[in-house]
Image (tube, rainbow, N blue to C red):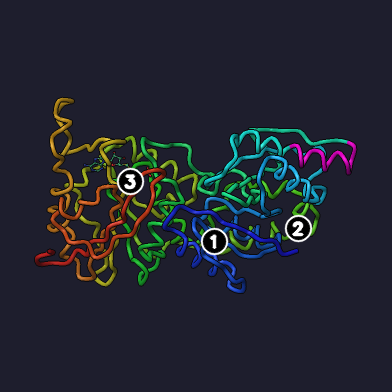
Amino acid sequence: MALPLFLPCAAGVESLLADEVKRVLPDVPVNAARGGVSLEGGPADVMVLNLECRLPQRVLIEVAEGAYRDDNDLYELARSVDWSQWITPQHTLRVDTTAQRSPLKSLNFAALRIKDGVCDTMRDAFGERPSVDVRQPDLPLMLHVGPERASLYIDSSGEPLFKRGWREDKGDAPLKETLAAAMLAAAGWRGTPDAGGALHDPCCGSGTIAIEAAQIACGIAPGLKRRFAFERLLPFADAEMRAQWQRLKSHATSRVHASAVTIVASDVSFRMVDFARRNAQRAGVEAAISFHGGDALERPAPVLPPELPGTLMMNPPYGERIEVGGKAARPSAEDRETPDDFFPRLATHWKRAYTQHPAGWTAYVLSPDMKLPGLMRLKESRRVPMWNGPIECRLFRFDLVSGPMR
Ligand SMILES: C[S@@+](CC[C@H](N)C(=O)[O-])C[C@H]1O[C@@H](n2cnc3c(N)ncnc32)[C@H](O)[C@@H]1O
């Protein structure tokens, strides 16, 4: 059974996700589309994608697609699916909707019509209908309505994939795990000496970048620590599919190895370092990361073997969401309008501390401030558009080499 699959991702991440899916399923043709990638796949592919992919938000299975003009057309769309292949009347469901230039007046009503279509189909088949569970449904459905066409998907992931199952300590402005993974992918960082080398996040917060990096460096599949909605659906529930799922997880577990590169996480807030360490412990990578407290403006560069390059990667405080601490902290509330000297001082520190290493350091900074390179008096060698939730950002790359850097 090959079905159309769609893996949505943050805008700007599509081509990185297409590369990731090609690595995970080398024999399957993959198309990068706006907002995600599409491919054809069976239940085994759905399991592999959920287990192994770091960049998608979910793995969606398209079960119906068609033109629509009103809610009745959506009801018929839901009626066109043989739901008895997916669920029993004892399963629960929930319908979420997304819309782009849809003529519909109420998306809630559209979701209700889809739910009616599923329940009526099940009642015709079994004389009983499934019920709704908005919190932990067995069958999470997603309806996407465009200007003229609608697509109905089963969300095989359930909880979005950025929830890897290890985060309990959040901090103030944590990055989504999928975005941290996108930053690493955009940098070509793959946790080996010749693909990015060592990694240091000097403003690590709850540790997302370092933990994602350490899982990559240790070969830990991102989905190993969590459950997925597909595990409760009929095509995945027979003994053969359950055994296959166990084999996939055992195989992923057998691939886990020690990191070949140094990974360092530090933050001016000791409370954050503690959060990061506890998260890393749950993610199975505490031993792969060295944690330190300390001001990013003063911390010496990690000492590396001369031939090992280093990657600095950070999601610094933005001001709107989180304040700068340490040496550049603003002394009082009245000072909030004072231009920040954190970034120029950070650049000065990098020039002093990170340019002497023979194999070189490359810095990546995720920021919504398009003028950041000017502020740091550094010339970026690349800027990659990325969205941190609703905030449009750039991932700036700075090559830290000795001598004048402009
Ligand atoms: C936007 S948060 C980083 C969030 C992190 N990427 C995560 O996923 O949790 C910025 C972090 O920078 C830290 N910070 C602020 N000023 C700092 C400084 N001078 N040196 C080091 N860290 C600093 C804050 O404590 C905060 O944890």
Circle nearer the N terminus (1, 2): 1
Q: Is residue 206 visible?
A: yes
Query: Residue 330 placed where, x, y %?
Result: 16, 33
Residue 263, placed above or below residue 335:
below
Q: Is residue 401 above or below residue 153?
A: below
Residue 102 location (% of width, % of height): 56, 44
Residue 403 percent across, percent down from the top left: 10, 67
| Direction from residue 204 to residue 214 in the image, left or right | right
- Is the Cβ of the residue at disc 1 closer than 8 Å to that at disc 2? no
- Most foreground residue, 256 or 99: 99
The correct choice, above or below, for 13 with respect to 176 in the image is below
Magenta highlight on residue 107: no
- Quick one: SS at disc 3? loop
Query: Please, what secondary structure does the residue beneath circle 2 have?
Result: helix
Q: Which residue is depicted at the point 81% across and 37% down? A: 90
Is 120 inside the magenta-drawn segment? yes
Mark 3 C-beta closer than 8 Å to ligand 1: yes
Q: Residues within 10 Å of mark 2 (few under 14, many from 20)?
A: some
Which residue has dot 2 on it?
241
| Residue placed most toward the observer, 141 or 317 | 141
Q: Quadrant of residue 396?
A: bottom left
Q: Which mark is residue 37?
A: 1
Q: Is residue 38 left or right of residue 312?
A: right
The residues colored magenta run 116-127
Residue 355 vs 92, above or below: the answer is: below
Q: Distance of mark 2 from mark 3, alpha carbons?
A: 40 Å
Mark positioned earlier in the residue sequence (2 or 3): 3
Q: Quadrant of ligand 1?
A: top left
Q: Which mark is residue 204?
A: 3
